[in-house]
Image (cartoon, grey):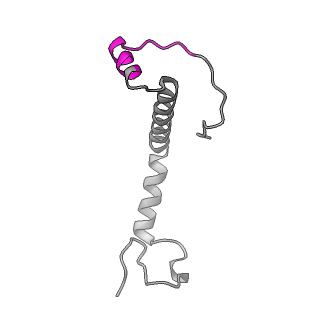
Amino acid sequence: MLNFENSPKKATNLSLNIGLLEAARQLGLNLSQTVNTLLADEVKRRYWAKWNEDNRDAISAYNDRIAKHGLPLTQYRSWGQSLGDGRTER
């Protein structure tokens, strides 16, 4: 879904700040790889931010249900006596 590792590349024109471009070249940065990596990170960040926003109501309802009723199948756990909210009954 968000795996861009094996996607083909396409030549693209970008307008960049001249001073920034010169500094990057002096540092030996591979501009294509740097922009590609940073753009992929930003696309993923925005994708998940949108996903969280789009699913906010469902996530909230699920969290409310867990807070009220605990985790499903808790009684079948073989470790600890979880209350379903991270606490352990003693």
Compared to 56, does 6 lie above or below? above
Among the 4 quarters of the image, the one containing residue 27: top left
Compared to 73, does 2 lie above or below? above
At 41% across and 61% down in the image, what residue appears?
Answer: 64
Front-most of 89 and 44? Answer: 44
Front-most of 89 and 37? Answer: 37
Residue at the outermost bottom position: 90
**What's the magenta region?**
12-25
Image position, residue 12 (x, y; %): 56, 15
Among the 4 quarters of the image, the one containing residue 60: bottom left
Compared to 14, does 27 lie above or below? below
Quadrant location, the C terminus: bottom left
At 51% across and 78% down in the image, what residue appears?
Answer: 74
Front-most of 82 and 57? Answer: 82
Compared to 30, does 67 lie above or below? below
Image position, residue 83 (x, y; %): 41, 77
Image position, residue 78 (x, y; %): 53, 85
Quadrant location, the N terminus: top right
Front-most of 20 and 13? Answer: 20
Check if residue 79 falls in the magenta segment. no
Q: How many marks?
A: 0
At 50% across and 42% down in the image, what residue appears?
Answer: 51
At 39% across and 17% down in the image, what residue appears?
Answer: 21
Among the 4 quarters of the image, the one containing residue 87: bottom left
Image position, residue 30 (x, y; %): 48, 26
